[in-house]
Image (cartoon, rainbow, N blue to C red):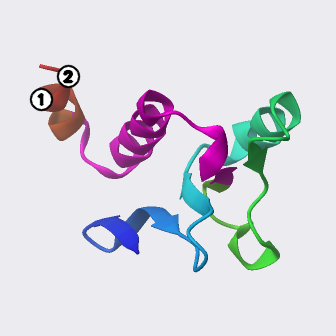
Amino acid sequence: MRFRVGRLVYAAFYQDDTIMGFGFPREERAALVASEPEKFLMPRPSDMRYRWVCVRLDALDVEELRELLVDAWRMCVPKKVAAAYEG
């Protein structure tokens, strides 16, 4: 399953539904993975060129999952749309 804004994928569940990839700043992903390697992992080699990182779903609570998805979505939408969401 993939979540999109237009043609841009901002989150996707891998086939076994235990790992989710999501949009994340490329320059920050190594630090994220290093900070919690039991939770976050680098994307597969074919996805390294994208602004993408992966997470083990069983390591997340619902609120953290929501935060990751909203942040990934914000990377794909126009700034006006993101600002309107913030209210």
Q: CA distance from mark 1 to mark 2?
A: 5 Å
Check if residue 49 falls in the magenta segment.
Answer: no
Query: Tag on residue 29?
Result: none
- Is 62 in front, or is 82? 62
The residue indicated by pointer 1 is 84
Q: Residues within 10 Å of mark 1 (few under 14, many from 20)?
A: few
The residue indicated by pointer 2 is 86
Q: Are marks 1 and 2 in contact (CB under 8 Å)?
A: yes
User: Which structural element holds mark 2?
Assistant: helix
User: Which structural element holds mark 1?
Assistant: helix
Q: Residues within 10 Å of mark 2 (few under 14, many from 20)?
A: few
- Is 34 in front, or is 82? 34
Q: Identify the residue at horizontal 58%, vertical 80% (top origin).
A: 15
> Residue 26: image x %, image y %?
68, 48
Name the amino acid type tagged 1: Ala
Q: Identify the residue at horizontal 66%, vertical 50% (top origin).
A: 55
For this view, does 71 lie left or right of residue 57? left
For this view, does 58 lie left or right of residue 43? left
List the single residue furthest toward the top: 87
> Residue 30: image x %, image y %?
82, 42
**Span highlighted in magenta in the image:** 54-79
Check if residue 56 falls in the magenta segment.
Answer: yes
Magenta segment, principal secondary structure? helix
Name the amino acid type tagged 2: Glu
Dividing the picture into quadrants, the one containing residue 31 is top right
Dividing the picture into quadrants, the one containing residue 67 is top left
- Is 54 in front, or is 26? 54
> Residue 79: image x %, image y %?
25, 36
For this view, does 49 lie left or right of residue 65? right
Q: Is residue 7 above or below residue 29?
A: below
- Quadrant location of the C terminus in the rendered image: top left
> Residue 4: image x %, image y %?
32, 66
